[in-house]
Image (cartoon, rainbow, N blue to C red):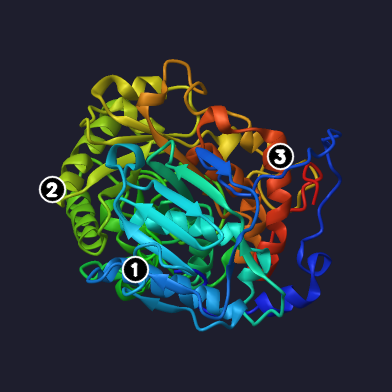
Amino acid sequence: MFAGEPRKFSKFATMLGVGAFVMSCSAPVRVSTTPAPTVSTPLLIPMPASMQLRGGVPFEINRTTVIATPANNAEVDAIGQSFAAFLRRATEFPLVVSAAAVGGAPNTIELRLGGDAATLGDEGYNLTVTPDSVRLVANTPAGLFRGVQTIRQLLPTAIESEIGVDRSAWTIPAVSITDRPRFAWRGAMLDVSRHFFTVREVKEYIDLLALYKINMFHLHLSDEQGWRIQINSRPKLTEVGSQTQVGGGPGGFYTQPEYQDIVRYAAARYITIVPEIDMPAHTNAALAAYPEVSCSERPAGLYTGTDVGWSSICVDKEESYALIDDVVREIAAITPGPFFHVGGDEVKLLTDEQYTRFIERVQDIVNRHGKRMIGWEEIYKARLKPTSVVQSWKGDSAAQALKYGSKLVLSPAKKTYLDMKYNAGTELGLDWAALIEVNDAYDWDPATYNPGVTEKDVLGIEGPVWSETVRNIGAVEFLAMPRLAALAEVAWTPQAVRDWQSFRVRLASHAPRWRYMGVNYYHSPQIPW
Ligand code: ACM
């Protein structure tokens, strides 16, 4: 549920402290001069919708604390077991999980299903901490899992340590929280095509998403440079198409069992995988494997550069749709989540008529295999089903996507593209959309960002990491953190509750947590670390 697999760096990070583990950062462009406010509230990210501090004596986890879960509910029991396993690492307490201790017994952390469905929704929870007990109530296991992340953040940061920590008290402040997310889609995307990331690296990123209540994880599985998922009926996609990456490295791909392992790992953290096969452009790796689906039929070479939009699957050939059907069918069969992402962005070689005809046919294929289509902003040109979702990134045509009743996921490149540089001196990342400091990533409202788009049109938001410049998960983390935490709060917390000055102070308090987790991050000059 948490850091399920041991990490190479965590123990060293714990021992070495900040300086040794933070990538050097370049000269600041904007330095906040506002003094940090004194914050007495718990330093939670995302900030809960509603929280009252009771004050006084906190709850203290000790050697005899019990995690209480309902009898005969294997799913909640699994949440309790993995929470107990997480707490045991640093505390070295036994922390028994038991159905016998339900009902507010002393010295228990109780996970209970129930509460008011209308108030809590699918992922909300109520948390009541008194000196005697901790009671977490939600309508769904997902709500309990989100609430457990809040308890985790209420504990001292050393709770993240993978080895025993000798400290006098593991306390949880006495609070009452009623919380639920603002948006249903709180997403992150990782481009595993430009550079390939191992299963272990992907899981490390998922661990970070879970801490911040992100619930959708979009894998960009194909592009010009690489095809990254095994398709049994089309073996050359990986035999040929996975062999390299940007800069000419060895590339790689996930076997179907490996992909399913990622799906399960995410599902245990109540995170839904959204697979993307980008088409009709961004397809060079596939065309290199199956030249018969290109219009020229000349075998394309593998590509290790970073230009975009110059390839296209041949939209006038039936062979193209047969290949797409095989790919969608096989991936849909091993993807429990409801969405299949078809890309659809940056098409330079087709007329609008060819493009819309293609997208509408692909929409039918995706629906036939039981999934809802999502695609990048450009798909608004096609006749979309109301169930299809448009992911805006440029924003200029976001409102037009609403004409057929589709909902929007907002990924405005100037706010949410986590691969943009922080400032002109940042070594990693790109700058074609914007330089994005932490406050830029925080200070926007999805309900007012795009003209003609209102809160009800927005399913949620998502932060992509495109991987032209990043070759390992430490580099991904440097670009994502701390902007991913900002995005998580934009997505979860009601706009009226959000506040930059409070956020920057809370964010500073999370750095020790990241160091225990072995997570690399950007030491922004805007944050009072
Ligand atoms: C995109 O950035 N081409 C979706």
Crowding at mark 2 (Cα within 10 Å: few <14, some 14-19, many 20+): few
Q: Is residue 222 left or right of residue 490?
A: left
Crowding at mark 1 (Cα within 10 Å: few <14, some 14-19, many 20+): many
Label 1 beta carbon less than 8 Å to ligand 1? no
Mark on residue 315? none
Q: Are marks 3 and 2 in contact (CB under 8 Å)?
A: no
Residue found 29% across the figure and 49% down from its top: 340
Q: Is residue 123 above or below residue 203?
A: above
In the picture of the structure, the residue carrying the numbered disc 2 is 368
Q: Is residue 431 left or right of residue 341?
A: right
Residue 369: x, y in percent?
15, 52
The residue closer to the viewer here, 499 or 33, is 499
Q: Are marks 1 and 2 in contact (CB under 8 Å)?
A: no
Q: CA distance from mark 1 to mark 2?
A: 40 Å
Q: Earlier in the sequence, mark 1 or mark 2?
A: 1
Q: Quadrant of the N terminus?
A: bottom left
Query: Which type of secondary structure does the marked residue at label 2 adopt?
Result: helix
Amino acid at circle 1: Thr
Residue found 68% across the figure and 34% down from its top: 500
In the picture of the structure, the residue carrying the numbered disc 3 is 437
Label 3 beta carbon less than 8 Å to ligand 1? no
Q: Is residue 492 above or below residue 330?
A: above
Mark on residue 69? 1
Amino acid at circle 2: Arg
Q: Nearer the viewer, mark 3 or mark 2?
A: 3
Q: Is residue 48 above or below residue 10?
A: above
Q: Earlier in the sequence, mark 3 or mark 2?
A: 2
Q: CA distance from mark 3 to mark 2?
A: 43 Å
Q: Are marks 1 and 3 in contact (CB under 8 Å)?
A: no
Residue 420: x, y in percent?
64, 43
Residue found 24% across the figure and 23% down from its top: 404
Residue found 36% across the figure and 72% down from its top: 101
